[in-house]
Amino acid sequence: METESNRLHISFLPLPAQGHMIPMIDIAKAFATRGAKITVITSPAFAAIFSKQIERANQLGLEFHVQTVKFPSTEVGMPEGWENTDATAYSQNQPKFGEALSLLREPVLRILEKHRTDCLVTDFFFAWATDVAARLKIPRLVFGGTSIIAVCAEEVIARHQPHKGVSCDSETFLVPHLPGDIKLTRNQLPEHLRRLVENDFSKHAGEALESELKSFGSIFNSFYELEKDYADYYRNVLGRKAWHIGPVSLCNSDTADKVQRGKEASIGRHECLQWLDSKKPNSVVYVCFGSLTRFSSQQLSEIAKGLEASQQDFLWIVKGDKNQEQDWLPEGFEERMDGKGLIIRGWAPQLLILDHESIGGFVTHCGWNSTLESISAGVPMVTWPMFADQFYNEKLVVQVLGIGAGVGSNLFAVFAEGAKLVSRDDIDKAVRRVMAGEEAEVMRRRAKVIHEMARKAVAEGGSSDSDLTSLIEELKQHKAACESK
Ligand code: UDP
């Protein structure tokens, strides 16, 4: 039974990035729904972005508190507010970003000391977090925000270096020992792995992994049935401890919760729903590449031409700066597409869109959140991976689950900088494969089956629900053991 004395207080420290913070807030909600008191530690800029979501959680009777800590941008020689520029924070300035994350150690420790907490859940990239938790005699849980297949594949490649055996960067190699016959090319790997060199990113990631290995364990936003072989591999072969508690986005069943995730949406919910309601079931392809990817004008123009050629209705989210928006639309495109396509410039209410019955396919960069949100909604995918874990996620979607078709993106390019152009024909072909014809029907049926599995996993007694229960039990036992000492 829940009493004040055994009630858990859990502190969450997310990475200041939408793709990491959005699922972490959902994870926090899952714990809060089970009675835990939550403190989210973040920068003032990110606290502002997520304030409505947190307010709403409190209105729903959950207990959320926020502690802000200044992100040390100026301390590492960057302008004030730099952490909030999404894309620029990581790629060009990786060493500075890593340095800023290290500088957060002391202020976060002071917060944790002041507000007694029973467990610290942080993003993978806070390499100091296990030490800080040990000092406070509390467990540290790691959240990496990625799929289990990605973690396993990357670990296997790093250990066995199968890519050393191929003669060029575009020749495929098999990821050995891993189930699923996963084949990749060196071109699809991050630079440090491709060339087997150490760079700032791999150094930081190496320290973070060492810290993770000493931690209490890892939380995955995934569910056992989805990645069974990889979950078993992670546990039994890599010997690591994990709880799979997703898809956590499914805790957002109310329209207001689906709309309010991360940044303020650039389209009103009614306008968006009105447009979607006017379309037939499964007739619209949704096109969005997450929070970080920025395409060149040339690529945007190819996307427009590919979508037009596919003859499908579309809802396309375009990010980028205003100047860029002027020059890439093909002549007369908006007039020709009037009623057929809607372009939203800025931030989309993605969950609301994916859950709408008119959506028949999702052109995605295979960021793990987007991938899992699509799976949760039963929507097949046109896969267009570019960096991070995205190539592994594509393998899961296309090859293992059979619910997607790729555009043929095969070069690792952070935020799509320096990416190889994907032609309108390749976009057109992949969109048609997923949206129309027999193959599309087969994918759609499979996607619906997996969608049901996802719902069951988080429902009472499902695999994710049970994993969360056992994690909470372990944390309570740990708390009780500490208090009795
Ligand atoms: N997202 C959104 N609206 C947008 C773009 C992204 O709500 O216009 C959300 C999306 O639903 C997902 C997250 O932002 O939860 C993006 O995470 P993902 O792992 O897919 O990609 P990343 O942005 O980290 O590359």
Image (cartoon, grey):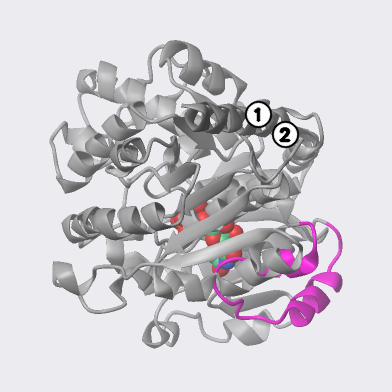
Res 25 → quadrant: bottom right
Q: Which residues are magenta?
A: 253-281
Per the image, label 1 sits on a secondary structure element best described as helix
Which amino acid type is shown beneath numbered disc 2? Asp
Q: Position of residue 114 (x, y in %)?
A: 40, 57
Disc marking residue 465? 2
**Quarter holding the N terminus?**
top right
Direction from residue 20 to residue 171 in the image, left or right = left
CB within 8 Å, label 1 to label 2:
yes
Around disc 2, counting alpha carbons within 10 Å, would you say few (fewer than 14), some (14 to 19), or many (20 or more)?
A: many
Does the stretch in magenta take in 470? Answer: no
Direction from residue 377 to residue 483 in the image, left or right = left
The answer to whether one can see residue 101 in this image is no
Decide: is 60 above or below 264. Answer: above
Q: Position of residue 363 (x, y in %)?
A: 59, 55
Which amino acid type is shown beneath numbered disc 1? Asp
Q: Mark 1 = which residue?
A: 467
Residue at 69 percent of width and 60 percent of height: 351
